[in-house]
Image (spheres, grey):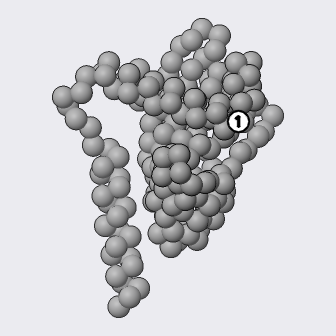
Amino acid sequence: MKKRSYKSILALLAFVFIVSGCASSDKITRAEKRVTVLTKSAEVLQQLYEEEPEAREQIKKAAGYGVFNNANVNLMVASLGSGYGVVVNNTNNQRTYMNMAEAGIGFGAGVKNFSIVMIFHDELTMDSFIEQGWSVGAQADASAKVGSQGAAAGTEISAKAITIREVTQNGIALQLTVKGTKFWKDTELN
């Protein structure tokens, strides 16, 4: 009976999470949505610069960067998340608004609101990400944070052409998951 209850709770939370992430108000204009994305992006960058001052120079020298805001729920063996963001080309200041969704399996529990900052070291990698947008990886983290209170130990992934940093805003989570993340252009905002 307990096993069935956990599955029911997980299914209900997944449904609520996905529906709430996909819901949008028709009363908010396209321009207002863009401002919201850009404002949140600026807040995340400011937090990153306060926590890791060297990131400012790294982003300044890069071909471009992306900032994505994500909410993630992990219950026992399933992890689900969704979010939005923007990729900025440093050469021409072009912005590409994007969405994201993720699903994974692993062990853990928690709810976490976090952001991902992607630093693209060359334009080819950035353009490929914008057009194709898939990412698969493992994640291990521990966080207990509300506003500026608490701490989070997230991940930083560096490859030759991209650096990915995680910035945690709020949440409590302890998880080890393998997940797939899909990024795609937001047809409404581009």
Judge by depth and name the residue closer to the eye, 72 or 100: 72
Rendered position, 178 above or below 31: below
Which residue sits furthest right? Answer: 160
The residue at 30%/49% (across/down) is 20
Q: Is residue 184 left or right of residue 188?
A: right
The residue at 38%/88% (across/down) is 2
Q: Is residue 94 left or right of residue 22?
A: right
Quick one: quadrant of the N terminus?
bottom left
Report which quarter residue 30 is drawn in.
Answer: top left
Judge by depth and name the residue closer to the eye, 107 or 136: 107
Spot occupied by residue 147 in the image (x, y as percentages of width and height): 48, 46
Report which quarter residue 178 is drawn in.
Answer: bottom right
Whether residue 93 can be seen here: yes
Q: Residues within 10 Å of mark 1 (few under 14, many from 20)?
A: few
Judge by depth and name the residue closer to the eye, 169 or 164: 169
Spot occupied by residue 117 in the image (x, y as percentages of width and height): 61, 35
Which residue sits furthest front? Answer: 149
> Mark 1 sits on what residue?
52
The residue at 51%/61% (across/down) is 172
Whether residue 134 can be seen here: no
Rendered position, 84 above or below 181: above
Quick one: quadrant of the C terminus?
top left
The residue at 71%/30% (across/down) is 53
Spot occupied by residue 183 in the image (x, y as percentages of width and height): 51, 38
Which residue sits furthest bottom? Answer: 1
Q: Is residue 5 left or right of residue 123?
A: left
The secondary element bearing badge 1 is classed as loop
Spot occupied by residue 105 in the image (x, y as percentages of width and height): 56, 65
Judge by depth and name the residue closer to the eye, 42 or 27: 42
Q: Is residue 66 left or right of residue 120?
A: left
Which residue sits furthest top? Answer: 92
Residue type marked 1: Glu
